[in-house]
Image (cartoon, grey):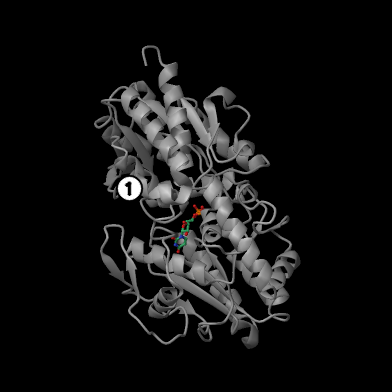
Amino acid sequence: MTTTISPTGRLSAVHATARPVAMLASVVGEQRHARLMSAARDFRARFAGHTIWTVSSTASGGGVAEMLHALVGYVRDLDLDIRWLVISGDPEFYTVTKHLHHLLHGFPGRLTLGPDSVAHYEDVLAANAQDLLGRVHPGDIVLLHDPQTAGLAPWLTHAGVHVVWRSHIGTDLQNAATWEGWDFLRPYLQHADAYVFSRRAFVPAWLPAERTRIITPSIDPFAPKNQELAPATVRALLAGAGLIDAPVTGPPVYARPDGSTGLIARRATVVAESLPGPDEPLVVQVSRWDPLKDMAGVMRAFAEHVVPYVPGRLVLAGPALVSDDPEGALIRAACVQQWRELPRPVRERIVLASLPVDDVTENAVLVNALQRHAAVVTQKSLAEGFGLTVAEAMWKGRPVVASAVGGIPDQITDGTGVLVPDPSDLAAFGTALCGLLSDPVTREALGMAAHERVRAAFVGDLHLLRYAELLTALRSAVPGG
Ligand code: UDP
């Protein structure tokens, strides 16, 4: 393979703080903890002298980065050599990969991926591959995440590395858009040794079934995003960030992963007529400003089908925008415009918030506080690989109303939340919200069941165990491995 080295293409190493696996025992029980420790011992013996590399497109923002901080942190504590690298690319590269992301979710978008897009995608990844090849050794394992990194696969297999491609996205129903996306990626993916998806229905038919595993994502109960916060702390944090109007009775502090105390230092940017009081019931959706998260649809459903019937406010919260997300800026601006066009009494009931992103931990703690403070959490996505925000809210004992798309129905089962079958059915969505807003007993029952569901199925020990099984099988399949 030849390449023009582009100016981009340097990998950056991400430091994930080691997280004590022993802590997980208090959540998942001794038996599950012991199973993980035993798998780790076996893994260490088999892979002695080799490194696990995990390669993604970003160290912050979105579910993949959220999970990698936790999983890499735990693996480090298990005394395995794991390194996390982030690729670099230019805006054109990320426009192509964002488009691929939409295609694999079944949405055609506005771009056409012609030969220029292919060439640029390959150039950027070839440059990243040069850097990566200087670091890896034969027999190492490289986990590549999502379409952004798929083009690294051919380079790595030629270097004698085990390559696993992990897709965090997909849709149950394949269509012209998904075919176009898979056609783009297939030449690279066929070089990988194994494939991981969040759901069986996401797997394209041409991938060899015997080399494909289903591994569901997970949350980390001890991450800043999910750590326990007392109600008084939640109020202090939200008031400190300018998200609710409450007297600040204590310092807005939280625990940082290194054990130090963090203080909310930045305020959210809020579009609202006024801030909610501390006791007003909130419906909250936390998402990236992405068309597939359908913040606009949540706003319409709330304005038309909730505001006339029950009290409470809607908070739509996303990250304050960073310059490399032009689509996010457009989506947020459209939401602000939609909000402005609402009659004032309706606007009074809806808050758009952009959470500061300069400090990843501070951002995570604010999401945590918002989710904990919510009476109901929503995730009205049009497509969703898994939807970590759902598991996050369920872990916090919140009742969730979500569309039954992608990985969401894997999380919300009977009695652990409310699924709306058709994401475009705003009336059904609003009715579900009204029902819960006026029924605290059901909210409590759903929340308790939701918490147990996450403990049983979506805590990181299971995620790591399944990876250990996959990688061990991969090693055994190699002659002399
Ligand atoms: N998130 C965040 N800050 C924000 C918006 C989202 O930390 O302002 C987090 C959210 O809590 C979750 C992740 O980003 O951990 C989103 O993951 P999900 O699987 O829901 O969707 P993705 O963004 O990966 O499509």
Q: Residue 159 placed where, x, y %? A: 32, 23
Q: Position of residue 7 (x, y in %)?
A: 28, 44
Task: Say if 54 sits above or below 264 in the image.
Answer: above
Any part of residue 174 in sight: yes
* Residue 88 in sight from this viewpoint: no
Q: Is residue 37 left or right of residue 386?
A: left
Vertical placement of residue 341 versus 399, above or below: below
* Rendered residue at 59%/85% (across/down): 348
Q: Is mark 1 within 8 Å of ligand 1?
A: no
Please report the residue visible at 35 percent of the width from the left and 76 percent of the height from the top. Answer: 252
Determine the residue located farthest toward the top in the rendered image. 479
Q: Which residue is mark 1?
A: 20
Asked which secondary structure carries label 1, the reply is loop
Task: Tell me the quarter of the picture where residue 311 sits.
Answer: bottom right
Q: Position of residue 145 (x, y in %)?
A: 44, 40
Front residue (pair 178, 280): 280
Classify residue 108 as left or right of residue 73. right
Of 177 and 297, which appears nearest the observer?
297
Tell me if mark 1 has few (under 14), some (14-19) or many (20+) residues whose alpha carbon lies within 10 angstroms of its own: some
Determine whether, in the image, residue 301 is placed left or right of residue 55.
Answer: right
Q: Nearer the viewer, residue 327 or 457?
A: 457
Amino acid type of the residue tagged 1 in the rendering? Pro
Q: If the image is split into quadrants, where does the N terminus sit?
A: top left
Q: Residue drawn at (34%, 30%), measured in percent from left and top?
A: 41
Instruction: Tally the marks.
Output: 1
Hey, which quadrant is residue 8 in on the image? top left
Q: Quadrant of residue 2?
A: top left
